[in-house]
Amino acid sequence: MGGEMEIVNGLIHTMGKQGIIKHGAVRVENGKIAWVGTMKQWRERYHAADCEEPILDAAGGWVLPGIIEAHCHMGITEEKKGMEGDDCNETVDPVTPWLRAIDAINSMDAAFDDAVRAGITAAMIGPGSSNVVGGQFALVKTRGRRIDDIVVKAPAAMKVAFGENPKVNYSGQGKSPSTRMAIAGMLRRELFEAKRYWEQKVLARGRDEDFQEDFTKECWIPVLRREIPLKAHVHRVDDIFTAIRIAREFGLDMTLDHCSEGHLIAQELAAVGFPAIVGPDLTSRNKIEVQNVAFKTAGVLARAGVLVAITTDHPVSQIQSLPLCAGLAVKSGLPMEEGLKAITVNAARICGVLDRMGTLEPGKDADIAVFSGNPMEVFTQTLYTVIDGRVVYDARDAQAEEYS
């Protein structure tokens, strides 16, 4: 953990109860945010002539909570490494809930450095969408060599997929699922068996009886307890409604990831209350089910009352484009403040880590991004990225390296 640090002379977007603080400061102690307020308050409370802790001058720039990518495959689908670096999909069995992203994420992937340079301090990373059930996602920080040291929450979600991807992958192998009916049926069967397993385990414990644990079912218990959500890959309207139907049947929490046709059913989605992680929109419409992909989706959903985050789905779109994707959503109708929320506080809430990140409030992890201006604008530069109270990116150092 980092020691003491001051970030001063910034336009502080706390994304929390304090709102926006003009000409503000943030104090960090032992890797946590200790205090947020105005420069006047900071001078009165902390500043002294013999002040020794590092001071980062935001020089009027924007200071935000570290940006959060709510859905990606960074480090599990490595860049420029082909099959050798692709561990995203185990396409030999359509139901693999026991797989754990943490066993495949390579934190030395170049995308992690790109994320840090873009002010992205945390990412939700997990298996792809080839399987009906792909396995367990993990929420990790974006700087650190050992994955165990940067995990914030694991498991953080259970990946399930509807529609085109499982159909294409398994019909080509001559086995189920080759229809949307089979995808839904296989997921129902797996959830039914997992629920029965959990009930039997609870009953055996109550009777003080021996119980034979099943590794392939134990991974479902956090989902059934609603400690983590289903993370549903859904693009088309019919697939979105199938996912909702199954989540309701089993009383589960769920996030609607991609939600590409969500703008067509915004009121219905607002009524059911599941959050949406929208994107990737900065990519081609290369499949049938993404023909209605549009940057307007996030704005239509947010205005209807849906809790919205934005994703690049890296490497489908590059991780460093996340703030720009939010900006393009704003250009297409998402309110400016909602654009910032979609990559900070909303993403933290949806990923189940709002207790640690997503806002600049005392007690939270000192994950902070400092920008020359609005990060959703293309010419804005990242000045500093701070993770756990340590400066992990300094634009001045990067520029010095570039010209050395």
Image (cartoon, helix red, strand yellow):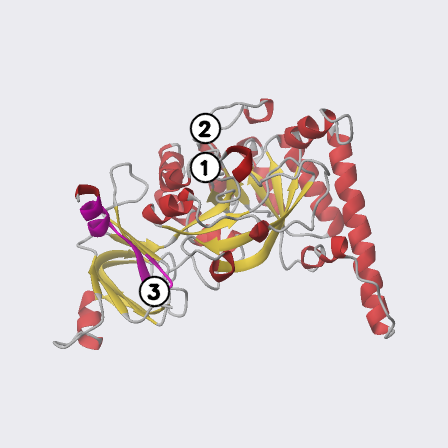
Q: To which residue does mark 1 refer?
A: 79
Residue 336, given in percent of the width and then of the height, sits at 35, 43
In the image, taking residue 204 as reference, residue 243 lies left or right, namely: left
At numbered mark 2, what does the secondary structure look like: helix, strand or loop? loop
CB within 8 Å, label 3 to label 2? no
Give the extent of the magenta segment. 386-401
Q: Is residue 204 above or below residue 227?
A: below
Q: Nearer the viewer, residue 284 or 271?
A: 284
Residue 261, given in percent of the width and then of the height, sits at 56, 31
The amino acid type found where label 1 is placed reads Glu
Q: Residue furthest left?
A: 49
Give the Cα distance between marks 1 and 2.
17 Å
Q: Which mark is residue 389?
A: 3
Q: What residue is at 72 percent from the left and 38 percent from the top?
A: 94
Q: To which residue does mark 2 refer?
A: 283
Q: Nearer the viewer, mark 1 or mark 3?
A: 1
At numbered mark 1, what does the secondary structure look like: helix, strand or loop? loop
The amino acid type found where label 3 is placed reads Gly
The amino acid type found where label 2 is placed reads Thr
Residue 199, given in percent of the width and then of the height, sits at 82, 61
Q: Earlier in the sequence, mark 3 or mark 2?
A: 2
Badge 2, how many Cα within 10 Å: few under 14, some, many 20+? Answer: few
Q: What residue is at 83 percent from the left and 55 percent from the top?
A: 196
Q: What residue is at 44 percent from the left and 31 percent from the top?
A: 295
Give the Cα distance between marks 1 and 3.
29 Å
